[in-house]
Amino acid sequence: MVPPLNTLALWRLRPVTLADEPLLRRVHACTRQAELDASDWSETQREQFLDLQFRTQRAHDEAGNPGAEHAVIEVADDQAGVWSAAGRLWLQRRPDALHVQDIALLPACRGRGLGTRVLASVMQRAAASGRMVSIYALQGNAVRRLYERLGFVPVGPLSGEHQRMAWHGGPAAPAREPRPDLGMGAARLQP
């Protein structure tokens, strides 16, 4: 269950555990929904496709990005004091950049400012350590407007259907906002 709109201001990151696999599969599936909707595949074919894609992405992440930090994005219901999963953040620390390898939110959490808050946190950490933030955006994906609004600019040519984008700090950085104690996730994601 996702808390009401007004409580999305309370969020945190926590490290991924083995127990999170069903959640991560659900988040992965929702990122592929438009692609599945355009197909005429049976439910069995869709499940096989999602399983193959999930396992392939995981193997690629583990082999090619050994230092990547994997976090679950959680939001709080301040009435009940319960934290609920809202998405995932995969972040790589590079010498010159914090690279957002992946950020994905469950559909009920999209368009409510949570992605902006999470990215603003990454941007603030990068600025504090003198690094830029980089991310790849799929051409035609509406989330690219969010990246541009936050001050990300295209860098270099297209790579297939993806555009590398970077934020270099400066006046486009989002204002610092109060946030709750982010616990272990914050400690792991510090620059």
Image (spheres, rainbow, N blue to C red):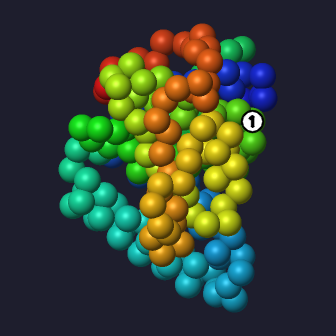
Q: How many marks?
A: 1
Instruction: Tell me where residue 45 sits by quadrant.
Output: bottom right
Q: Is residue 59 above or below residue 41?
A: above
Give the structural element (helix, strand or loop) at label 1.
Answer: loop
Q: Residue at x 52, y 26 (%)?
A: 170
Q: Nearer the viewer, residue 21 or 129?
A: 129
Q: Residue at x 60, y 10 (%)?
A: 178
Q: Residue at x 69, y 26 (%)?
A: 8
Residue 154: image location, x then y, percent: 54, 54
Q: Residue furthest right?
A: 5
Q: Is residue 172 above or below residue 148?
A: above
Provide the residue designation for mark 1: 112
Instruction: Tell me where residue 75 sits by quadrant.
Output: top right
What amino acid is labelled 1 in the image? Answer: Arg
Q: Nearer the viewer, residue 151 or 30?
A: 151
Residue 29 is at least partly visible in this image: no
Residue 54: image location, x then y, percent: 42, 66
Q: Nearer the viewer, residue 92 or 131?
A: 131
Q: Residue at x 35, y 25 (%)?
A: 130
Q: Is residue 6 above or below residue 39?
A: above
Quarter of the image where the C terminus is located: top left
Residue 139: image location, x then y, percent: 61, 66
Residue 5: image location, x then y, percent: 78, 29
Q: Is residue 17 above or below residue 177?
A: below
Quarter of the image where the N terminus is located: top right
In this rendering, position of residue 180 left or right of residue 108:
left
In this rendering, position of residue 87 left or right of residue 15:
right
Q: Label 1 neighbourhood size at 10 Å, few (<14), some (14-19), many (20+)? A: few
Instruction: Tell me where residue 109 sits by quadrant.
Output: top right
